[in-house]
Amino acid sequence: MDEQRRARSEAPSGPRASHHRDLKPRLQTEFQAELKADSLAFALLGAATAVVQVRAGMALPQALAGAFANPAATPQARGAIQDVAYRAMRQLGRSEALVAAMAPKAPDPLVGALLAAALPLMGAGEDGPAPYEAFTVVDQAVTAAGAHPDTVRAKGMVNALLRRFLREREALLADVLQQPQARWNYPQWWVDAAITAYPQEWQQVLEAGNVAPPLTLRVNTRKGTVEAYLEQLAQAGIGARRIGPSAVRLDKPVGVHLIPGFDSGLVSVQDAAAQLAAQLLDVHDGMRVLDACAAPGGKTGHILELADADVTALDVDPQRLARVQENLDRLELSATLRAAGAQGRDWWDGQPFDRILADVPCTASGIVRRHPDIRWLRRKGDTLQLATLSAQILDNLWQMLQPNGKLLFVTCSLWPQESEAQAAAFAVRNRATRLDAPGQLLPAGGAEQDHDGLFYALFQKDA
């Protein structure tokens, strides 16, 4: 309880008043600095450019795409930029608190982002030991600062702050870790929501979201067995173990195109929790199935791997729907794709479905370890807004379900308003019979819980 009180503390949870940001109307995020692509400085500056855009409201994958567009960015350089950026996102609350404690006034946005990219590299963190020597990080951060017009005048400050952190690390951390946002690396409202929802497990849930996720694969059982694939991995010198009916977790992540059999459709990348969806849906050959909100298509592919069904994959975003088609092509499977919103009916031919998978929009709080920028992009009010939209989608899809058919409600949220409360209210509104399903899965770490925080509720429409 003492930890809960401290986490809910009314003490300042962020930078002091002089550190509130006044973003420039135009950052030179497209500037291409003359740095060696294989240098840490290049990776730091690329990551900082992505971080500053996340702080301005852009999702991290889109921000990184801009950094990757630099002609000098080799595949190795893009990998380094991505690694540094993801580390920065997972420790952003702590890094910003450290900068606020050391700097007399708030640095310009890109300077602050550069420091937020550098600080997590200077000591052991949730992701493991420090990846670089601390003095190398200082040197390369200063080099990066000197290579960009938005940061060049702050070279001295970058050098001074990072060196001060090295000298006073223990005292500085002891001070800033009194702030919940720095201690947990989440906004205060997120910490409060976790405590309210999970009074016993909230610390493990928050900590799990700060650790890089494992790489879990789904073996395509149309093309091979899990046992045969594990042997193939062993022959390639890749350690792995089976963790589910079709799930294999690699001991160490590798690049997707280095995964044996990936390009030929033998396996797909899919979290262990997400692999439960197709199994719970209980699809049989010949059934008419709707995968609503289908992109990027992992669950669509899994359904078709398990049964010869007539599947419609629906998604509101045509570009994301194209990714569904790419995944199906790789797996050599086919489905009918429809670009439309699941809350409407313009796309529907009026023929009811035997099974409906409703992976509805949500805050994505349960997959924050894979998308660490989400915590900084979401706002407290998003939960109610998204829950309202999801309720509309569920009620609409229920009308398209065949009597005796099943609807599987899935969300990747940790917040009960979007999961259990939503499921209970849906059952009452629609007089739906609720069947056995896992409910809320918590990403609490450990070998058997090393999965995302998904929620499952299964309903049957009575004849």
Image (spheres, rainbow, N blue to C red):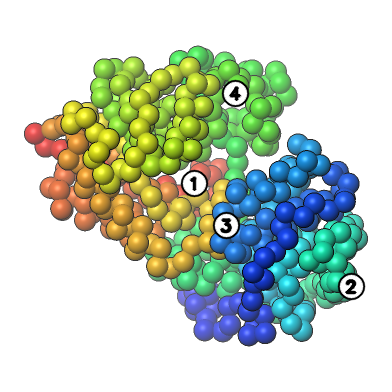
For disc 3, the neighbor class at 10 Å (few under 14, some 14 to 19, many from 20) is some
**Quadrant the C terminus occupies:** top left
Question: In which quadrant of the rendered view does residue 304 lie?
Answer: top left
**Residue 325 screen position, x and y as percent:** 47, 27
- Residue at 37% across, 23% down: 335
**Residue 174 screen position, x and y as percent:** 71, 76
Type of the residue with mark 3: Met
- Residue at 74% across, 48% down: 81
Type of the residue with mark 2: Gly
- Sequence-wise, the earlier of marks 3 and 4 is 3
Res 156 label: 2
The residue indicated by pointer 4 is: 262
For disc 4, the neighbor class at 10 Å (few under 14, some 14 to 19, many from 20) is some
The residue indicated by pointer 1 is: 452
Q: CA distance from mark 2 to mark 1?
A: 42 Å
Q: Nearer the viewer, residue 218 or 33?
A: 33
The residue indicated by pointer 3 is: 58
Which label lies toward us, 3 or 1? 3
In the shown orientation, is residue 150 left or right of residue 269?
right
- Sequence-wise, the earlier of marks 4 and 1 is 4
| Residue 314 in view of the camera | yes
**Residue 184 screen position, x and y as percent:** 59, 66
Which label lies toward us, 2 or 1? 2
Type of the residue with mark 1: Asp
Type of the residue with mark 4: Phe
Decide: is 94 above or below 84: below
Residues marked 2 and 3 touching at CB (< 8 Å): no
Q: CA distance from mark 4 to mark 1?
A: 22 Å
- Residue at 60% across, 64% down: 56
Residues marked 4 and 1 touching at CB (< 8 Å): no
In the shown orientation, is residue 368 left or right of residue 234?
left
